[in-house]
């Protein structure tokens, strides 16, 4: 049941909203989490948690139980069919998590939900907000069915189509186009690819990400011209045949789950308006190339939760402006990085030899390889 009042209302119980709520609850803040879905998703897009995100999750007690459920990937490769163009290792990362953790987003959400429950919190479902009004004292958040909750602060973690963001009129800047079309699938395959690394196949028709999951499944993510409503086994096999290994081709044996989605490259004009704060996909969306989206959202959430807890403990609320000023440039950099990876994948045939030479040069240059490993791992986002 919705409370009449709360210190912080978090809208959205994905990884970003849950991480913000756990951070606040650990500091003794009264926090209420709502989500419009009647139950948590059992299938989800993101499948990699990078080293810096694990460090951030460790601050709120969520890293260890998540690591137990995932695969430690020590390497990232970019391939053109059978040729390895780029190989980046994570073993020497300056982190206690020298790997990328391959684990379903639903597992990440379950771990964070367990942490919130252990701290006395819960997710209230299904509650859909319809709008909000705000003033100097906080916000009145309105729900379908007529209920209203008064909150001192509201965190919009409700995704790309954020009602929180739209209710306060924050622009979501980016190209005015239909957005990139993607196919997403969890499958089982007969494969010769290593089961402890993520492979990005660069093909003229678009990139294909191949990522092993803990239960023997494989996550496929592919940029396509127009994704079918229900990608079937034949469609997915054709993608693997066209973009994947040639000498030892992938053979699809089972399709566990499929979906499609579109991604725009957009960043919110601002992350704060009065008592309303944005994080995660409500603040920034971009191509999944590089696996940065959920990671950046979790990093947003913990930074915001820690800052907001300080404000509620008596620090000036200008700290929240500093949060916004620090986080938005990181989103701009990630959007640019994802876009560059996508352009590398889709270069025309005439430019591919130069691209391949560039990537092989990076592989052979230790300093360049290390910079890319730090960038992929998120450790370049570490403060200080």
Image (cartoon, rainbow, N blue to C red):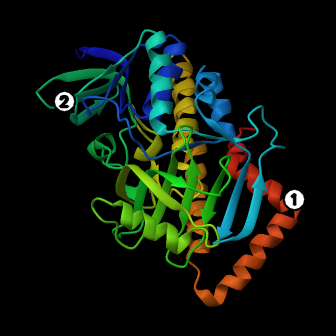
Q: Is residue 177 left or right of residue 229?
A: right
Residue at screen point 47% across, 63% down? 222
Q: Position of residue 192 (x, y in %)?
A: 65, 58
- The residues tagged by marks 1 and 2 sit, at their Cα atoms, a distance apart of 53 Å
| Snapshot quadrant of residue 133 | top left
Residue 161 in view: yes
Number of the label disc, if any, that sits on residue 367: 1
Q: Of helix, strand and loop, which one carries label 2? A: strand
| Snapshot quadrant of residue 290 | bottom right
Q: Of helix, strand and loop, which one carries label 1? A: helix
Residue at screen point 65% across, 57% down? 193
Residue 335 in view: no
Residue at screen point 55% across, 59% down? 209
| Residue under label 2 | 143
For label 2, the crowd category at 10 Å Cα-Cα, with few meaning under 14, some 14 to 19 and many 20 or more, is: some
| Quadrant location, the N terminus | top left
Q: Position of residue 93 (x, y in %)?
A: 80, 43
Q: Is residue 367 above or below residue 102?
A: below
């Amino acid at each position: 049941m919705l409370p009449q009042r709360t210190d912080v209302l978090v809208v959205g119980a994905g990884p970003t909203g849950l991480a913000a709520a756990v951070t606040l609850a650990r500091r003794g803040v009264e926090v209420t989490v709502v989500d419009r879905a009647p139950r948590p998703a059992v299938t989800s897009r993101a499948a990699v948690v990078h080293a810096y995100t694990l460090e951030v999750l460790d601050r709120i007690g969520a890293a260890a139980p998540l690591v137990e459920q995932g695969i430690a990937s020590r390497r990232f490769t970019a391939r053109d069919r059978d040729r390895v163009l780029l190989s980046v290792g994570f073993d020497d990362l300056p982190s206690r998590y020298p790997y990328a953790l391959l684990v379903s987003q639903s597992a990440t959400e379950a771990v964070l939900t367990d942490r919130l429950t252990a701290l006395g919190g819960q997710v209230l479902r299904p509650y859909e907000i319809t709008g909000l009004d705000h003033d100097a004292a906080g916000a009145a958040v309105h729900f379908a069915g007529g209920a209203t909750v008064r909150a001192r602060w509201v965190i919009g973690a409700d995704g790309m189509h954020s009602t929180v963001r739209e209710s306060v009129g924050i622009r979501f800047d980016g190209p005015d186009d239909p957005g990139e079309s993607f196919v997403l699938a969890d499958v089982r395959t007969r494969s010769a690819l290593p089961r402890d690394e993520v492979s990005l196949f660069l093909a003229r028709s678009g990139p294909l990400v191949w990522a092993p999951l803990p239960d023997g499944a494989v996550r496929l993510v592919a940029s396509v011209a127009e994704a079918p409503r229900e990608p079937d086994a034949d469609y997915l096999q054709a993608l693997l045949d066209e973009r994947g290994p040639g000498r030892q081709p992938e053979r699809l044996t089972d399709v566990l789950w499929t979906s499609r989605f579109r991604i725009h490259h957009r960043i919110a004009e601002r992350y704060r308006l009065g008592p309303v704060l944005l994080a995660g996909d409500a603040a920034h969306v971009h191509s999944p190339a590089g696996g940065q989206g959920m990671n950046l959202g979790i990093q947003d959430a913990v930074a915001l939760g820690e800052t907001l807890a300080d404000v509620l403990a008596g620090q000036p609320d200008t700290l929240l402006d500093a949060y916004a000023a620090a986080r938005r440039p990181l989103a701009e950099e990630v959007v640019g990085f994802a876009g560059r990876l996508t352009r590398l994948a889709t270069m025309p045939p005439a430019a591919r030899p130069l691209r391949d030479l560039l990537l092989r040069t990076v592989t052979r240059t230790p300093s360049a390889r290390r910079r890319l490993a730090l960038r992929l791992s998120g450790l370049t986002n570490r403060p200080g």
